[in-house]
Amino acid sequence: MTALLDIEGLTKAYPGVVANDDVSFSIQPGEVHALLGENGAGKSTLVKMIYGLVKPDRGAMRLGGAPYAPAEPRAARGAGVAMVFQHFSLFEALNVAENIALGMENPPKPRDLAARIREVSETYGLPLDPFRLVGDLSAGERQRVEIIRCLLQDPKLLIMDEPTSVLTPQEVEILFHTLRKLSAEGTAILYISHKLEEIRVLCDAATILRLGKKVGECTPRDVSAAHMAELMVGKTLSVPARDDHEPDEVLLEVRGLSVAPASPFGTPLRDVRFEVRAGEVLGIGGVAGNGQDELLAVLSGETPVVADAVTLEGKPVGALGPNERRALGLLCAPEERLGHAAAPDMSLTENALLTGRLRQGLDRRGFVDWGKTRGFAERVIDRFDVRTPGPGVAARALSGGNLQKFVIGREILQDPTVLVVNQPTWGVDASAAAAIRQALLDLAQNGAAVIVISQDLDELVEISDRFCALNEGRLSEPRPARGLGMEEIGLMLGGAHGMHEAAQ
């Protein structure tokens, strides 16, 4: 069989780094092909070359046996290559059909497009109402918009980057059913994910990159997830572990928290109440857009509330701002790395100063102690294996996974009493994710209370003592994480049961 896509010796270098070094592999028609590698391995650069966003320095590609060198994404789409990005490119104030039309070269009349959207979405098990506002859609429904936009192009090759990071287990099953249907019809799929068990279930073949080079290939269903992870990082991975212990006194308590959203498309919090104890990891699961950002903003102090709605070690802190809460030991790491957790154009040293000034004593008499600040940044870099030339590098120059390690490490090394993290291992490879999870467990082991807000359910089950689900701004009753099955968790994420009576 002639390969659909042949990649031969693709090489791309940037100042100081070779992103892809002589990479070669093939994708067959109808094949679901995984592209694996840790952060900085070169996956993003490679798919950008396939999609016409980046021009290779050397090497060649052939699509359907013919030379293929797209100068821009429009040329790639014209040749039959479509891509669903990890970060959605949708306008919330427009409806589904209007968003899809914006991504088409020659969109049909609105009535015809709406009919086509309904037809294609129902054919592939991803039903969509073309006239619903995108701002009113769940994260899973927004992903459907992106997928349907691609399918309307009748692609030969569909590239998917971390497609299940915002989906419930039930939505993952629906997506996999759709991808298998596409595969059976002859559409090839290039699938990027850090969720290796999903790779084993879905993919026919895998190519593994490490430091820009192809280091192996395998048939995922014939090997273990641990084997693939070890190929990616070049070493045996340790599994996060903790000692069994009884949680101690309550450190953080939230009572009767109801907050209106800051934006028209936000989610109001509705009578949220919970407590977290010293030595405990409380996992909060939920599909994106169900109130996670609003909850973190309240806990961090970015959204002030009634003083006694949030108490820290018995003291009311709801009306305090972020700096006052940090001084008392309540630290937070938000989901959005660039722009929220870190200032993109500031150096890592400067970003270390932004949240570490008070607890690390990085200023004296109103002047920044740059030597001490640089030392703090270097400790974070060393302790969390942040791949960077040094603390003077701008935050935006780091890969997403390495910046995530820096952001989480910066907060952990400040010895918090309570740490709240949102999506701590989002976009992070298996090795780095294991290290971050172990650091969170160690922090709890040393007496801190840790709240982990995440869409990665495997992560929450692995490290949480208790689990609760956030759905449309309501929080379910926390339950012991040990023994919870994915089907049960999926029902909790959908709001099926277990919510506080006052919130119903």
Image: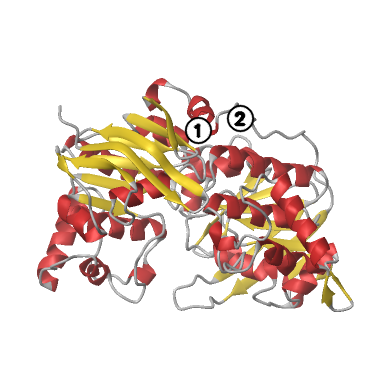
**For the residue labelled by badge 1, is the local secondary structure a helix, a strand or a loop?**
helix
Q: Amino acid at mark 2?
A: Leu
Please rate how many residues cluster around mark 2, counting C-alpha atoms within 10 Å: few if below 14, some from 14 to 19, many from 20: some
Determine the residue located farthest toward the top in the rendered image.
222
The x and y percentages for residue 315 are 84, 69
Determine the residue located farthest toward the right in the rendered image.
365
303 and 211: which is toward the camera: 211
Which residue: 77% across, 53% down?
A: 413
398 and 450: which is toward the camera: 398
The x and y percentages for residue 161 are 38, 49
| Marks 2 & 1, CB-CB < 8 Å contact | no
Residue named by callout 2: 237
The x and y percentages for residue 499 are 56, 57
Which residue: 70% across, 67% down?
A: 350
Residue named by callout 1: 232
Q: Is residue 460 above or below residue 219?
A: below
Q: Quadrant of residue 119?
A: bottom left
270 and 3: which is toward the camera: 3
The nearer-to-camera label among 2 and 1 is 1
